[in-house]
Image (tube, rainbow, N blue to C red):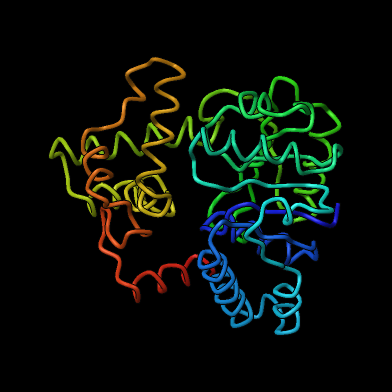
Amino acid sequence: MKNVAVIGAGTMGNGIAHTFAQYDYKVQLIDVSQAALDKGIATISRNLDRMVAKERITEAEKEQTLENITTFTSLEKGVVGVGLVVEAATENIDLKLKIFTDLDKFCPEDTILASNTSSISITRIAAATSRPEKVIGMHFMNPVPIMKLVEIIKGYSTSDATYKTVAEISEKLNKVPVEVNDYPGFVANRILMPMINEAIETLYNGVAGVVEIDTVMKLGMAHPMGPLQLADFIGLDVCLSILNVMYDGFKNPKYAPCPLLVNMVTAGKLGVKSGEGFYDYSESRKAETVAKMFS
């Protein structure tokens, strides 16, 4: 189980790859785009530099972490010899079903297939494979190298042995695994997304401004980050996708996305990733914010 494949070199994927590699797993990082892979490795390197500057790791440990990561643009080649795959692709059900169908063909039959999905049914993903007992959710929090929680989501057919293995791996990464059953939004997003959506509704209704809403939640509720700033870091498109999954799953109007959120995503205002969301993010501001997260 020391060989792991991570699919997707974006924010979550490169964070997951970083974390496994830092704990001396051999990581095969896969993305269809070589540019995305190069960007992901550069991000990992910068984040490791910050950890060296904070004396959390040594320069030698940084170099070893980077050496533990190999990149691939071919899914079939990238999963050769791995005991665990963690999929961290875009939160799109059709894409995930295609990936897991291919993983089922390309991976050894004893390989565990995990998804970092934040809302999509693990049972539905597992149904695209011939090994549903070995399919599980492994939902890391952002930024992955820092945040302790991993939601471990059992699908309808996930075996106890698969759960135990993934929980033990999470602990080896210095994470805290929490067992969760397979319902829309799981626990983290079922509670978090309605709060974020209500904060957006509060802004939409003119009750208060962006900074004011976030300040109330930080100072009044002891949240480390306001809900609108947090939405920007998650990605407004991701927030919208999760809310839509929960709304479709529960048919409850409390999960219906706020029109302001829908309009911002339509306009391409996605938060940090696009440079603008509820806040404005220049490149220097983005670097400063990431640095604070690793402080």
Residue 207, located in which quarter of the rendered image? Answer: top left
Q: Nearer the viewer, residue 278 or 236?
A: 236
Q: Nearer the viewer, residue 186 or 268?
A: 268
Q: Can the viewer see residue 203?
A: yes
Tell whether 227 sits left or right of 205: right
Tell whether 6 sits left or right of 194: right
Residue in the image at 51% along x and 30% along y: 185
Image coords of residue 6 (percent x, y): 67, 53
Is the residue 87 above or below the residue 74 in the image? Answer: above
Q: Residue furthest left?
A: 206
Image coords of residue 64 (percent x, y): 76, 77
Q: Can the viewer see residue 181?
A: no
Image coords of residue 132 (percent x, y): 75, 26
Image coords of residue 50 (percent x, y): 56, 77
Residue in the image at 55% along x and 66% along y: 34
Tell whether 64 sits left or right of 119: right
Residue 13, located in which quarter of the rendered image? Answer: bottom right
Total labels: the figure holds 0
